[in-house]
């Protein structure tokens, strides 16, 4: 019994600290055994697209059919979508910022570089939700699901 008490006295504070650190995002998860980087590293597809809280998923899918975001563990990023006659692909990189509560996205092409910081709302193995508010105070929220 004494060994169990010693083990619990050691493990409970560690478990509590781990759980407090895991509750990072507005919509969860409360606990995960995979690192944040491992959860982001995936190929994602759009499940829902909101503009100022209004569902615009159908409009987005009409304009950007089969859109995919691929985040690599090494920080590589690729976004691609199909237009009527061609596939568009942008490459770049990503990194956590603001104590891992946001992601800096940077897309690079021959003409310029596009940068955006998105706030993570939910980060699970098969779900990634984030939002961005632009200079006109329009909020865009994307709910992505694992594509594979």
Image: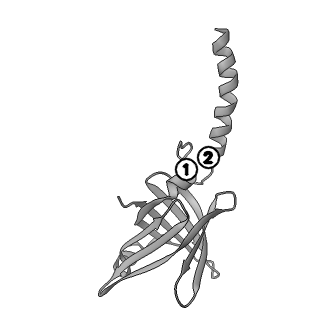
User: Of callouts 1 and 2, which one flags the residue occurring earlier in the amino acid sequence?
Assistant: 2
Q: Are the residues tagged 1 and 2 within 8 Å (C-beta)?
A: yes
Image coordinates for residue 71, horizontal then vertical, percent: 49, 64
Using the image, tell me which numbered label, if any, was put on residue 28: 1
What is the secondary structure assignment of the residue under circle 1?
loop
The scheme the figure's colours follow is one colour
Local packing at callout 2 (Cα closer than 10 Å; few below 14, some 14-19, many 20+) is some
- Quarter of the image with the N terminus in it: top right
Q: Position of residue 7 (x, y in %)?
A: 65, 20
Task: Confirm whether residue 61 shows in the render.
Answer: yes
Examine the image and state in which quarter residue 65 appears: bottom left
Residue farthest top in this picture: 1
Mark 2 — residue? 23
Q: Which of these two is toward me, 43 or 142?
A: 43
Q: In front here: 55 or 14?
A: 14
Residue positioned 65% across, 27% down in the render: 11
Residue that lies at the very extreme toward the bottom in this rendered image: 111
Q: Is residue 148 above or below residue 8?
A: below
Residue 101, relative to residue 108: is it above or below?
above
For the point 56% across and 42% down, the residue is: 31
Does dot 2 land on a helix, a strand or a loop?
A: loop
* Figure check: 2 above or below 39: above
Neighbourhood count class around disc 1 (C-alpha, 10 Å): few under 14, some 14–19, many 20 upward: some
Q: State the image coordinates of residue 39 (x, y, percent, origin top left).
A: 50, 53
Report the residue at 42% width, 63% height from top: 44
The spot of residue 62 in percent (x, y) is 34, 79
Quarter of the image for residue 60 reads bottom left
The answer to whether any part of residue 53 appears in the image is no
- Quarter holding the C terminus is bottom left
Q: CA separation, marks 1 and 2? A: 6 Å
């Amino acid at each position: 019994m004494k060994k169990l008490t010693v083990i619990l006295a050691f493990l409970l504070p560690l478990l509590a600290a781990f759980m407090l650190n895991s509750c990072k995002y507005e919509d969860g998860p409360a606990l995960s055994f995979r690192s944040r980087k491992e959860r982001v590293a995936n190929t994602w597809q759009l499940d829902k697209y909101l503009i100022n809280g209004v569902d615009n998923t159908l409009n987005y899918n009409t304009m950007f059919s089969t859109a995919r975001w691929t985040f690599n563990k090494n920080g590589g990023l690729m976004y691609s979508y199909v237009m009527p006659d061609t596939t568009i692909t942008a490459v770049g990189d990503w990194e956590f910022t603001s104590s891992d509560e946001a992601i800096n996205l940077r897309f690079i092409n021959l003409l310029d570089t596009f940068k955006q910081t998105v706030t993570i709302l939910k980060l699970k193995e098969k779900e990634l939700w984030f939002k961005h508010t632009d200079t006109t105070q329009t909020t865009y929220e994307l709910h992505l699901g694992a594509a594979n």
